[in-house]
Amino acid sequence: MATSLKSLSAHSSKNVQDISNKTFGIIVSEWNEDVTEALYSGAYQTLLENGAKKGNIIRKNVPGSFELTLAAQWLAQEESIDAVICLGCVIQGETKHFDFICDAVAHGITNVGLKYNKPVIFGVLTPNTQQQAMDRAGGKHGNKGDEAAITAVKMLGF
Ligand code: DLZ
């Protein structure tokens, strides 16, 4: 079984670093908000547990996951922001909308990270059902928001 990132955080020497002076932007998509709010709670708490200061965590909402990319660019271009975490949930529907949104967001977030040379984390769930989403937002498969936060922390310590 794969080791979760969060379980490594307390014990891995690679992850022991001071992030108290690091600033994080967290962008939350409002679509499927039960899921994305749970992702946000996980990410926020995990950053605090790892030493981030409340005042150094900036939250912004966007209407849907498609808008995560532009908002990530707006935050990443700020010199004061060290890492951006994008949180969304796109649930498979009957049309190709799902594929277009997922492709656009994955490519867009990648490009923003490369352009601004800082971690921009893909914390977007792409499940087939609402239940699968909830299972990954604090349910039986953990919380991918936690993992997104740990990924940001690890990348800052690279
Ligand atoms: C339109 C749409 C649909 C059908 N489904 C989702 C979804 O499951 N998750 C999500 O985050 N956003 C969805 N959206 C909204 C798009 O992301 C976007 O906000 C609109 O297409 C406007 O650009």
Image (tube, helix red, strand yellow):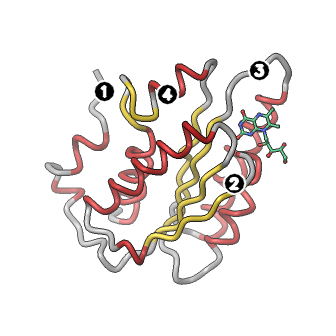
Q: Earlier in the sequence, mark 4 or mark 2?
A: 2
Q: Nearer the viewer, residue 136 or 156?
A: 136
Q: Image height check: is 27 above or below 98?
A: below
Which circle marks residue 93 in the picture? Answer: 3
Q: Find disc 2 in the rendering and name its residue.
A: 68
Disc 3: residue Cβ within 8 A of ligand 1's nearest atom? yes
Give the percent coordinates (x, y) of residue 80. Answer: 52, 83
**What amino acid is labelled 1 in the image?**
Ala
- In which quadrant of the rendered image does the C terminus lie? bottom left
Please state which amino acid type lies under the numbered disc 4.
Met
- Residue 17 in picture, x, y percent from top left: 23, 67
Asked whether, in this view, residue 149 is left or right of residue 83, the answer is left
The answer to whether residue 6 is left or right of residue 116 is left
Q: CA distance from mark 3 to mark 1?
A: 29 Å
Q: Is residue 66 above or below residue 57?
A: above
> Where does ligand 1 appear, by image quarter?
top right
Cβ of mark 2 under 8 Å from ligand 1: the answer is no
| Sequence-first tag of 4 and 1 | 1
Residue at point 37%, 72% (across, down)? 54
Of mark 2 and mark 3, the one earlier in the sequence is 2
